[in-house]
Amino acid sequence: MSTVDKALEVLGLFSERRPSVGLSEAARLLRRDKSTVQRYLASLENQGFLEQDALSRAYHLGPAVTRLSVVREITYPIETAVKNVMTKLVQDTSETVHLSHLQGVGLSSVGVVETAVRNTRVYINPSEILPLHLTASGIAYLAQEPQEKALKLLQQSFAKTSSVEGVTLESASALMRFAKTRGYSVADCTFDYDVVGMAAPVFASSGEPCGAVAVATPKSRFDSETEVRIATFLVPASHKISRIYGAPKDT
């Protein structure tokens, strides 16, 4: 790793859960000796990326980070960055793409990009709440939650929205396990009778799942080869959106 990479690793230690960090803790988390970490901390402090508390001697993010975040939001807003990733996913898959975030016991659409190269395309109603147990987005999201929370949300979703034949608590749980293993989920005509959805989770800056990005394909042109092709583009796109949201690299 270069010196720049190592210094930036220090900035990666900070989060809502860890707003400040001391020298010993930073060295332990980075698995580096204190003298080396101290040099990085001092350099980042000199450049305004970190500040050191006079009493606790712990470091927290400095004004340079705020300045850059303001510049980023003015020149390349999160909404624009996410929309660009979705548009590229549409170009790669030739299908409609939508992004949704958790709202209560369902998912609410926060963005839709339709394909322009297909005469037959899936229409996504942006005002419609997506049931967790019937949609690829819901399954992809639930697969990333702790088991106890996921089961509770799944049960609430079943209670709130009528299910379809063949969709049970057991079958939905099985789809969640597959989604966790593969990194994406598939919902075969369980929400719309002629639509197959594929979705991958997206994560917030806290590292926790916040929703999912999905590709919606008419059943008539979906097969195993289509699934493999879409997954090739879908999973990397979900990672890019998570990075835009500020999620840690390991999510």
Image (cartoon, rainbow, N blue to C red):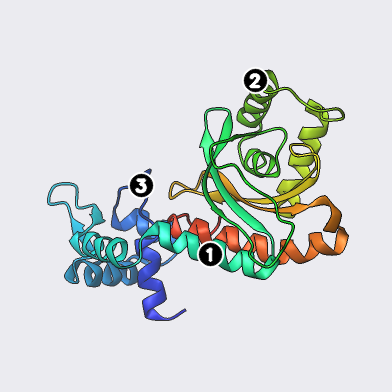
Which quadrant would the C terminus be assigned to in this image? bottom right
Q: Amino acid at mark 2?
A: Lys
Q: Residue at x 58, y 28 (%)?
A: 105
Task: Please tell me whether mark 2 or mark 3 is closer to you in this view.
Answer: 2
| Numbered mark located on residue 85 in the image | 1
Q: Amino acid at mark 1?
A: Val
**What secondary structure is found at the residue carrying circle 1?**
helix
Task: Please tell me whether mark 1 or mark 3 is closer to you in this view.
Answer: 1
Q: Is residue 188 left or right of residue 114?
A: right
Which residue is more in the foreground, 176 or 221?
Answer: 221
| Pointer 2 or 3: first along the chain | 3
Q: Residue at x 83, y 51 (%)?
A: 219
Q: Is residue 2 left or right of residue 237?
A: left
**What secondary structure is found at the residue carrying circle 2?**
helix
| Numbered mark located on residue 160 in the image | 2
Q: Amino acid at mark 3?
A: Arg
Badge 1: how crowded within 10 Å, few (<14), some, or many (20+)?
Answer: some
Which residue is more in the foreground, 104 or 20?
Answer: 104
Q: Residue at x 71, y 55 (%)?
A: 121
Task: From this view, report whether residue 190 is shown above or below residue 59.
Answer: above
| Pointer 1 or 3: first along the chain | 3
Question: How much space separates mark 1 and mark 3, taking CA atoms?
Answer: 29 Å
x and y percent of residue 134 in the render? 72, 34
x and y percent of residue 60 in the render? 25, 54
x and y percent of residue 110 in the render? 49, 46
| Numbered mark located on residue 18 in the image | 3
Q: Is residue 206 left or right of residue 167?
A: left
| Numbered mark located on residue 245 in the image | none
x and y percent of residue 169 in the render? 78, 26
Residue closest to the far left? 54
| Pointer 2 or 1: first along the chain | 1
Badge 3: how crowded within 10 Å, few (<14), some, or many (20+)?
Answer: few
